[in-house]
Image: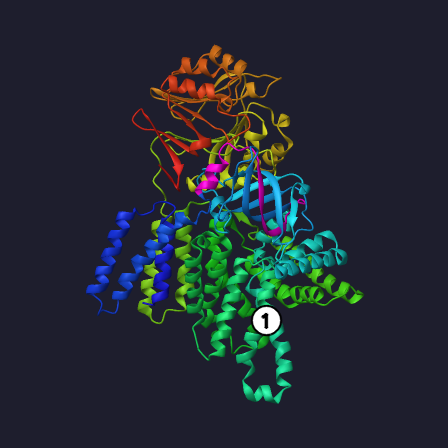
Amino acid sequence: MLLIPALLFATIAGLLLAPYAQLPKPIAIVVFACALLLGVFLRRRRFALLLFLLPIFFLQANLRYSLQFPLPLPVETFLENKSRLLVKGDLLSVRQLTDQRSQVDLEIFSLTDLDGAQLRPESCRLRLYVNEPLIGFLPGDKVAVEAKLRKPRLFGTPGEFHWPRYLAGQGIALTGWVKKADRIKLLGRSDRWVLSGITQWRESAVEKLERLTDETESVLLRALLLGEGKLLPDGVRKKLAAGGISHLFAISGLHLGLLALFGYQLLLTVYRRSPRLMNWQPPQRVLPILLLPLLFLYLLVTGDAVSTRRAFFVATFAALFWLCRYQVNPLRLLISLAFLSLLYNPLLLWQASWQLSFAGAAGILLWRPLWQGKTATLIPVLHWPLRLLLVTVSATLATQSLVLANFHLLSPSGLLANLFAVPLVSLIALPTGLLTLLVPGETFLHEMVISLSAGILQIILLLIDYLTQLPGLNARYIFLNMREYWGIAFLLLLPLLWWQLKNRRQKLLMTVSCCLLAAGCLWPQQRLNNLTLYMLSVGQGESMLLVSPEGQSILIDGGGLYSDRFDVGERLLAPALGELGIDRLSAVLLTHDHPDHRKGLLFVLRHFPVGQFWSAEEVDNLHPDLQRVLRETKTPVGKFSSGWTQVPGWMQEGLQLFHAKDSKNKNNSSLVLYLQDKSDGLLLTGDLEKQGVNRLLAAGLPGPVSLLKLPHHGSRYSNTRQLMRVTEPDIALVSAGYGNRYRFPAKELVDFSAEQKLPLYRTDTMGTIKAELSHERWKVTCWRDGLFR
């Protein structure tokens, strides 16, 4: 067994276990001691070193995980109960975002609160978002800004993107926001002349592109040439993802390879003109080393992306090996780089760019015997298209499960799209664009060349539009749980490794192993036999999932933030449904048409099969966005009249809905859901306020209530105490956003629950709550560290 691949496997295994469980130090010491003893007693055996090193690297990866989150304890303590702070720091980077916003990274050297107390953290980075373009600042500038700082945190929903870990992987410990760019004050200019010079060149390149092209073309070219993919509008980004060509607009090995190719050809022409140089050393040994400064400069200019960094390191090692006449297997070199990068920064394992970069390159190298050897004898007109197809297929097989796990998107048109997009970008759009930026001036020729590059990109977008509208080639969202993503990965691993296997026995063993592993992961989960309610943590909003023992499921509200930049349905609800094994919904219920209950439903209605949509309002009275989705999806709509209405087909007819129309207050018009199971019942009260609660109590309850969802996020104005006295529940649930400005749930209700010895479960501090009715008793667990605990 190869040592480095085995150590990489042990490191990845230790890291993958770490978010769920970290080994206690006593157990780690025992494992280390056992590994050491095995290594000593079996030191004469070939595998003794492996037996010793595997657990060591597994342990170091597992134990280092929690150390990678970079907020120092003194800073966390200093932030408590602080409304705003004066921050002073060194500016690390400035990036422009969509909607005329900016992103600024700072290395903090001073924090001062409003009372004058000061803290000087040793190492703490801040990511600041500005609602305006930030112009005139350079890396290394010393700046000051007054802002409210936050420690990144999760919503606490199954399947959600791990935002704190993503930031920690970049060394970011805190986030903040300011509205105006003039809130950031310059204290002193940078002394980092290299980075400042690069930034100034980037700004001049951007100005050049903006003068030579229109706004749409300029954004596309900035993404392709300068790595400013965050500027792409959401519609364009989704179009590229649907066509499977997003990778072409992220600076990667393709860009670096083309720059190296053109640079090599230029240097080779000069080198061959000198007989002395030709007699001294062959060009293939010397020129790659000479190209490294150019490639490193391009790495800095384009923002030092993970995929570009990986390509640069590969190029560096390859150049050194060529110089020393040392032959190395490219796949082993790639594995070694992956191993070293995880030792340097373990959190890279969860960075999508790191995953896709290494997996794609590995897939291409695994199929090298096929696309390099089998096609070599074909005529060029067949050789190059077939080679491109095989390279695209191999990269797709290697990355597809990762794309699904990270982006939940299947792009069937990707294979065809890459056949024309890769040559057009690599041979025309990218070289002509770079040439325009590198050659000084803005002549008519510059304008013609950059127009050619921009025109090629527009043609690619049009072809993507055409391909994705063909039957069977349209992109679709797929939401699964992590176990199922692993199953897909095992299935796709078989064709990837097939060409590396040398005999039938190896192929048979690999086929059986991959199929068994895939079957174990993809085997349907055992259905819950108990009534279960999930209160999903969606911030200052509300969404619940009710699942019956028969497998029927109702999504009650969908949450929603008032900002349009974060789609609760796409980012929280859909991944949660996938993680919980829900692939269709029997019904979707909207208690009332407010944004914090409605907005998240739009994405779910578009991308999940839904049996019925329930509301107390006529469709024509709903929000226009919701009307449009219901008509596009042709979802059957059920409307409920005033009073209690029994819903047939649910747990021995135990499901009932209550509605009391109030034309002046939508909260008081909330649909109330009651479900009885034998001697237990749950009551979900929407956003009822005092008058709505009084109407509900006056109408009477259909049966006992052992689980109560507090009305209106735990507001003090909903007559909740009376409701709790009448229902006498065993447990109470409330949905609220962490640190929300309304201070929900109200302190009076929290204190009252404590006085009544009533367990109160809240999403703002506990995350998603799972209440399962088992043996006439509610068993409550909360989502924490990837599991319900």
Residue density around tag 1, few if under 14, some if 14–19, many if 20 or more, within 10 Å = some
Residue depicted at x 47% and y 17%: 720
Residue depicted at x 55% and y 75%: 288
Looking at this view, name the residue that lies furthest to the top.
Answer: 698
Query: Toward the viewer: 692 or 397?
Result: 692
Q: Is residue 518 visible?
A: no
Q: Name the residue under label 1.
A: 260
Quarter of the image with the C terminus in it: top left
Looking at this view, name the residue that lies furthest to the left.
Answer: 41
Q: In this view, does 44 lie above or below 684?
A: below
Report x, y in % for residue 599: 57, 34
Q: In this view, does 444 lie above or below 746?
A: below
Report x, y in % for residue 199: 65, 57
Looking at this view, name the residue that lies furthest to the right.
Answer: 444
Left/right placement of residue 250 relative to residue 398 reads: right
**Is residue 671 on the magenta stretch?**
no
Q: What stretch is highlighted in magenta?
A: 73-101
Report x, y in % for residue 87: 58, 42
Say which amino acid is labelled 1.
Answer: Ala
Query: Toward the viewer: 349 or 503?
Result: 349
Local secondary structure at mark 1: helix
Left/right placement of residue 622 relative to residue 607 reads: right
Q: Is residue 158 visible?
A: yes
